[in-house]
Amino acid sequence: MTREATPCREGDHGKFEITERDGWARLGKFHTSTHVLNTPCLLPVINPNIRTVEPREMWEKYGFEALITNSYVIWKHEKLKEKALSNGVHELLDYPGVIMTDSGTFQNYVYGDVEVGVEEIVQFQRDIGVDIATMLDVFGTPDMSKEEVEEAVRETISRAPASIQAAETTLLNGPVQGGTHPDLREASARGMAEHDFAVHPIGGIVPLMERQRYRELVEIILACREHIPWNRPIHIFGCGHPHLFPICVALGADMFDSAAYALFARDDRMLMPWGTVKLGDLKEFPISTAALSGHTPDSVRSLADDARCELLARHNLEVTASELARCRQAVRDGTIWGLVEERSHTNTALREATEYLYENMPESLISATNPLRSGGVKASQDLPTSPPSVAALGRLLNSFESEANRAILISGASGPWRERIGGLVQTIGRRWPDAAVFIETPLGLLPYTLEDVSPWAHLNGPPSIWNSLSLEDRAFDLEALVGEVEQMVELSFSNDKRTNLELIESAFGEGLDEGRSKAELDRQMIEDKICYFLDVERQFAEQLLSGSTFVYSRTHRVRNVHSEDGQHLFSPRMRDGGLSLTLEGARRLQGSGIPTVVVDDDSIPFTRKGRNVMHGFIADVKGDLNPGLPCLLESQDGTFLGHGVSLCTGSEARCFRKGVAVKVRDGIGE
Ligand code: GUN
């Protein structure tokens, strides 16, 4: 397959944009003058002296859009240096994609004899035409004293200005060092972020990965992630084992590089998505790749050394490429956390790292996660510890309020619950209006008013999960949602309506005749959804809905919500239980607490026409923008301009310069 590189458009050089995301995990495009690189991606390491697989094949056959080689190795080698300087590095390697070079830092760490100047090595990388160069950082190792690591961090930051000047227009890597010390990692990230680097690799981690100290790797990424500008890609230096990709991608990694495919092949070791296996231990291949096609372990073992090494390197490259493709697809599908959980069970060190992450999940990762999940959610993978669930549960606890002093808990079945107990809930509203109804789900108690909201309504799993909540969890949830209740009764979905009514009667007594009407119950449902999805203050929602009326579907679900004066404001969505706003509904939410993007003056005419809000045209953000949820659009003088769905967080809106920030639903017109 011959593929052409696609150079970036003028003015986009060095910009990074997000095209899909789930929490911190993101698919992006990094714009370079040679090629627009799709991320997350892996850059195979090419040794200019020993080429196990030709760079041209990396591009054409395996689809790697970028590679990394070492500028110091080229610089030291007279012939290579001369060729690179006269013909450029792309011709030297015969590779049309993005070429990143390292600076010699790693050689210095391994051999300790690097004699090149800070500016000299950056100038050389620029002169041979690399796309992304690397400054000469100081490698902080895990066994250095804290003072030594601190000095490495300080020295690396102090070299930044001269390196950036030497790079001129060449994009430059600014590595984050700091060893295993979270405070030094943070200081390094903050210090490097102040300079105009294009990419931030996380460095100094190879010795940790060699010893499978994965928990510390997670700690390091957590310590620096939030201090690296969101609009710069993050590269994980020397991380090439496929089983680490899902957790790193979930933590926001955009690039990886690896020599593992070739180094492991030399030792007859094969990379698999779940770990490494020795060729010598295999009777059959547990996975099929094009490289292994027509072979058995025996036939590969009988090959000559060079041929065997090449074949295993090709297999390793294929596995690496396909595991990264799996991660990217999982980000699109909203299943990256499922993949993290799955891979965590393949290795005890990785399991420890994953559990550490679950216990130390950053607030800003949770608030960057869309709580709405499209399609079914596997109950086994959408653990209460995973960010989509935590995001949903956090919103529920923050937004839900009830004056009920009695509670009715129903357990034992998956959704859709309305079909099973819609009638019962209406009777409860009429006879016991001070009772709130909750459904028991594996993620905790769900107020019936949010019965069709994802992820609760779309959890898939065996019947047993619908009775799996412990007594303590139920009591905890109830207390958090409604506080102290005077009375509680437990019902089962497997009972018929009469039996359940008898159970309520025997606990609560006869009740009233004319408590709450269906319209009042529906109004409560819409109010709870407005508070849950739109961050609107409850009093505001209550006032907005006072006197509202509804248009119903044939199955008696609310199709449209109209204000007292007859304006269509909202429509509940069947697909995920969300709320769609009309232009008038959005207008009336101004000042309610709903997240709002203030666009700059240049883009007012476009926003009014309903065109998407692009990064780089945002003047301010009010409230907490949540990717996937609605927001309002205003001009700087506070004029309402329209509404849409945010694709970014507030911190991202403040720094990105490329890509769509808000998918606009409607504008107020010209
Ligand atoms: N390769 C692997 N780790 C590192 C690092 O910390 N710095 C540089 N420049 N290259 C690396």
Image (spheres, rainbow, N blue to C red):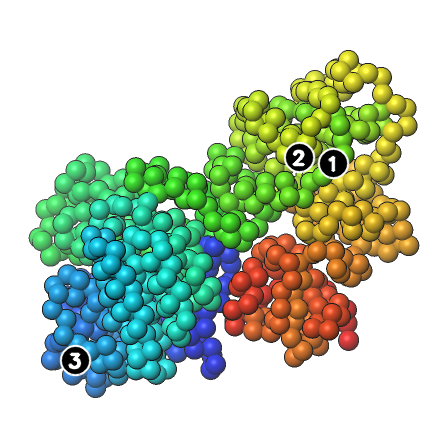
Q: Which residue is mark 1?
A: 402
Of the image marks 2 and 3, the number of the one nearer the N terminus: 3
Name the secondary structure under disc 3: helix
Q: In the image, what residue type sits under mark 3? A: Lys
**Which label lies toward us, 2 or 3?**
2
Of the image marks 1 and 2, the number of the one nearer the N terminus: 1
Q: In the image, what residue type sits under mark 2? A: Leu
- Looking at the rendering, in which quadrant would you find the N terminus? bottom left
Q: Are marks 1 and 2 in contact (CB under 8 Å)?
A: yes
The residue at 32%/66% (across/down) is 175
Q: CA distance from mark 1 to mark 2?
A: 8 Å
How many badges with numbers are in the image? 3
Image coordinates for residue 159, horizontal then vertical, percent = 29, 74
Residue 81: mark in rendering: 3
The residue at 14%/71% (across/down) is 114
User: Counting other residues with Cα less than 10 Å from the Cα at mark 2, is it few (<14), some (14-19), or many (20 or more)?
Assistant: many
Is 516 on the left or on the right of 583, as rendered? Answer: right
User: Counting other residues with Cα less than 10 Å from the Cα at mark 1, is it few (<14), some (14-19), or many (20 or more)?
Assistant: some
Cβ of mark 1 under 8 Å from ligand 1: the answer is: no
Q: Are marks 3 and 1 in contact (CB under 8 Å)?
A: no
Is 105 on the left or on the right of 614, as rendered? Answer: left
The residue at 71%/68% (across/down) is 634
Image coordinates for residue 131, horizontal then vertical, percent = 33, 75
The residue at 34%/39% (across/down) is 352
Q: CA distance from mark 3 to mark 1?
A: 73 Å
Cβ of mark 2 under 8 Å from ligand 1: the answer is: no
Q: Looking at this view, name the residue that lies furthest to the bottom.
A: 86
Q: CA distance from mark 2 to mark 3?
A: 68 Å
Examine the rendering and report whether any part of residue 62 can be seen.
no
Q: Which residue is mark 2?
A: 481
